[in-house]
Amino acid sequence: MINEPVTIKGTREGITITIEQNTDYESAKEALNRKIEKSKDFFYGCKAHLKIKNPNFSHDEVKEIKRLITAFGMNLQKVPNSSKLYKNRVLLLKKTVRSGQRITHNGSIVVLGDVNPGSEIIASGDILVFGHLRGMAHAGAQGDKNSLVAAFKLQPTQLRIANIISRPPEGKIETPDFPEIARLKDDIIVIEPYFLLNFDRYKKTGGD
């Protein structure tokens, strides 16, 4: 059985449009356009709820998917406190993430170990590393600018929060002997000491 990249189901509140986890942006856009075009008169004016399971979609890609839905005359409904809902879905990894590995999750990711150079961690929520973060980290991958990246040793090859990208300066950098946190302030990624790491809200929901 071949899984559809995009599914549209009727509900009591209207319709729910779901973009599946392994669907890339171009495939999602093409499939969505094809499905709605077939029955655009039926969909016109109805309430639509959007679910994107793939955390790799950028902020601009999510905006374009929403624009496409509204262009067909559907009333896209806002999901209240959606960022809080997915941040509570936590992937706990009790291992080192090695070079060549790519970890994605629609929620927050907690790593009890190191994240090595050449690896990638992508989360729609926060990224918390109980170890040395030296790979690429992308928090808030679906556009949540309130997401953060924290690590006991924060030295990523690339750091992204929502659609904002930061790279480390060239040359040798001294690593402080305390945890650090990266977050957005006025659309700029800032890194600060984080002495009071509070991971209590992150409960185990899966992982290795």
Image (cartoon, rainbow, N blue to C red):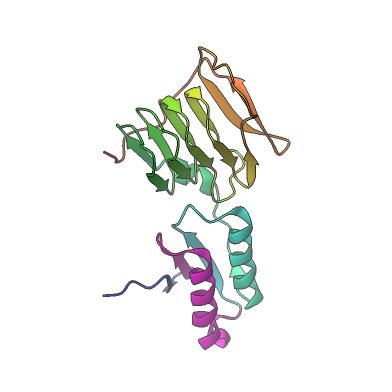
Q: Quadrant of residue 173?
A: top right
**Residue 103 x/y as whole percent:** 39, 45
Q: Is residue 49 above or below residue 189?
A: below
Q: Nearer the viewer, residue 181 or 205?
A: 181
Residue at image coords 49%, 81%: 35
- Estimate the x, y position of residue 154 in percent, counting from the top left: 52, 25
Q: Nearer the viewer, residue 147 or 152?
A: 152
Quadrant (top left/top right/bottom left/bottom right) for the N terminus: bottom left
Membership of 30 in magenta stretch: yes
Q: Is residue 72 left or right of residue 38?
A: right
Q: Position of residue 110 (x, y in %)?
A: 39, 33
Q: The magenta stretch spans which residues?
A: 16-44
View extreme (top): residue: 177
User: Can see residue 197?
Assistant: yes
Which is nearer the eye, 204 or 14?
204
Q: Quadrant of the C terminus?
A: top left
- The residue at 62%/25% (across/down) is 171
Decide if residue 144 is on the left or right side of residue 17. Answer: right
Q: Which secondary structure dominates the residues rendered in magenta? A: helix
Q: Residue at x 51, y 28 (%)?
A: 150
